[in-house]
Image (tube, grey):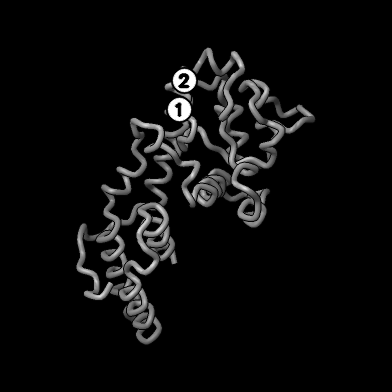
Amino acid sequence: MRLCEAFAFRVYKLRGSRSHTGQNTLFRLAYELFARPERADEISAELRATLLYYSPNNELEAWFAFQATKDENDWFDWSAIKYFLYEYEEYRAGKDEVKVSWDAIEGRELAKTTEHILPQSADDPYWTERFSKADHERYLHDIGNLCLTAHNGSLSNKPFSAKRGTPADTRPCSANSQLVIERDLAAYDDWTPESVLARRAAIVKWALERWRVEGPPTASPDAND
């Protein structure tokens, strides 16, 4: 199941391959697993090889490299961004139950569930003093600047100190959020380009471990795939 999830994420969501990519092989392997479960290890090995044929590990690393232009660095419009951030929330929650259900995230508009820490409208002096226009374009939609939230409307374009808040605040803020990855933001004293890159590095380290698959570097898929 883990290999199937990794295949779906890496090949269809991250790489953006067509939905039928690799399916002849996947259907054949599924039948073989059903008919001969004692061959599970061999079938898993072939599935690994097929995944790495379509999505090599060096390509996975390249996808998460910080890009030079705003268009290349636009993670906000990626179709899997909510899934990606929710998986990160599950990781950060550890053995604790995630307080906000996936259904609550998936069923709401992207803009209401995914916050830009550096806001899209950054007119407040706090932001203009820390991010030039070029910085704003470069860092705005990066994964280091995106976070799941349960109260994006109340955070809006406020300075980081107001967004961060304290655990004792009665108003919604990062520090008293139900989401661990949002509470993590309270550990930052300031939000600058360096902060975005530091948070990005932690997220990328996790992602490369989460979806990395070991195995042969190449494989020959079925001819009709």
The answer, for residue 194, to whether it is visible in the render is no
Q: Which residue matches tag 2?
A: 133
Image position of 85 (left or right of 7): right
Q: Which residue lies at the image location 28% right of the left edge and 66% below the top edge?
A: 50
Residue 51 location in percent, x, y? Answer: 31, 62
Q: Give the number of callouts.
A: 2
Most foreground residue, 206 or 148: 148
Vertical placement of 65 versus 5: above or below? above
Residue 160 location in percent, x, y? Answer: 61, 22
Give residue 193's quadrant in the image. top left
Image position of 118 (left or right of 54): right
Q: Which residue lies at the image location 72% right of the left edge and 29% below the top edge?
A: 167
Which type of secondary structure does the marked residue at label 2 adopt?
helix
Dots 1, 2 in contact, CB < 8 A: yes
The quadrant of the image that shows the N terminus is: bottom left
Residue 169 location in percent, x, y? Answer: 76, 27
Q: Which residue matches tag 1?
A: 137
Vertical placement of 18 versus 92: above or below? below
Image position of 108 (left or right of 189): right
Query: Few, some or many C-alpha atoms within 10 Å of disc 1 (few <14, some 14-19, many ≥20)?
Result: some
The quadrant of the image that shows the C terminus is: bottom left
Q: Which residue lies at the image location 45% right of the left edge and 29% below the top edge?
A: 139
Vertical placement of 134 versus 125: above or below? below
Report the amino acid beneath label 2. Answer: Lys
Q: Which mark is residue 26?
A: none
Q: Which residue lies at the image location 65% right of the left edge and 51% below the top edge?
A: 108
The answer, for residue 32, to whether it is visible in the render is yes
